[in-house]
Image (cartoon, rainbow, N blue to C red):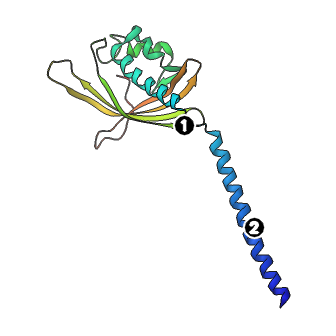
């Protein structure tokens, strides 16, 4: 009788130790995985938000002949299938895109920016509404959706690694749109 009581106690202690060790290993593995993703600082969030704000200004105005826009991207960054500084600048320079460009042309309005740290830097989404307000007293919503972004920190600060536009029109599957 004494022997079976010790056996049961031994088994119970063994089971408890197994649970504790297994839980500890899983928790340690979770901590290790979390440590690979460095949390963003308040300054990182502010700089990424400014990057996104500068995007709308640069694409709408065509500043610096489109290079203010192109310089928001990492050297190997892309908007959809457009890659490379000169190709990106061409889409934003006055007369180079689908819409007029210039200091008096405002078209892109963004809101509800969400940013999340990743192992490579950060990713984000931001709503965008494209409004044509060239005619005084009238504003026409041209398009809408959201941008899906990946951001990388470069020696020149945070830059877009990738940016794509996703339509959110009811009944229409999301498609990538060329840069307006």
What residue lies at 23% left-to-right and 29% top-to-bottom?
A: 141
User: What mark, if any, has residue 117 been given in the picture?
Assistant: 1
* Horizontal side of residue 8 vs 84, given as left or right: right
Query: What residue appears at the point 70 percent right and 66 percent down from the top-left corner?
Result: 19
Residue 167 position, x and y percent, is 34, 35
Residue farthest to the right, as pictured: 3
Mark 2 crowdedness (10 Å alpha carbons): few <14, some 14-19, many ≥20: few
Q: Quadrant of the C terminus?
A: top left
Q: Is residue 95 above or below residue 5?
A: above
Disc number lying in front (2 or 1): 2
**Residue 108 rendering spot, x and y as whole percentages:** 32, 24
Mark 2 vs 1, N-terminal side? 2
Residue identifier under label 2: 17
Classify residue 121 by image quadrant: top right
- Residue 116 vs residue 43, the one in the foreground: 43
Element on which disc 2 rests: helix
Q: Position of residue 131 (x, y in %)?
A: 25, 26
- Secondary element under disc 1, as helix, strand or loop, is strand
Relative to residue 57, is residue 46 drawn left or right?
right
Residue at 74% across, 66% down: 18
Residue drawn at x 69%, y 51% is 28
Q: Based on the displayed image, in which of its 4 quarters is residue 142 positioned?
A: top left
């Amino acid at each position: 009788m004494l022997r079976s009581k010790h056996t049961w106690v031994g088994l119970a202690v063994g089971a408890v130790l197994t649970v504790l060790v297994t839980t500890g290993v899983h928790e340690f593995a979770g901590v290790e995985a979390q440590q690979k993703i460095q949390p963003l600082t308040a300054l990182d969030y502010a700089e990424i938000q400014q990057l996104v704000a500068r995007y709308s200004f640069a694409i709408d105005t065509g500043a610096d002949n489109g290079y203010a826009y192109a310089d928001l991207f990492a050297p190997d960054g892309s908007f959809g299938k457009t890659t490379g500084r000169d190709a990106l600048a061409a889409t934003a320079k006055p007369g180079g895109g689908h819409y007029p460009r210039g200091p008096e042309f405002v078209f892109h309005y963004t809101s509800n920016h969400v940013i999340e740290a990743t192992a490579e830097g950060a990713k984000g989404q931001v709503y965008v509404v494209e409004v044509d307000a060239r005619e005084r007293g009238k504003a026409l919503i041209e398009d809408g959706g959201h941008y899906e972004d990946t951001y990388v920190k470069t020696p020149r600060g945070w830059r877009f690694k990738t940016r794509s536009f996703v339509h959110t029109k009811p009944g229409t599957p999301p498609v990538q749109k060329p840069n307006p």
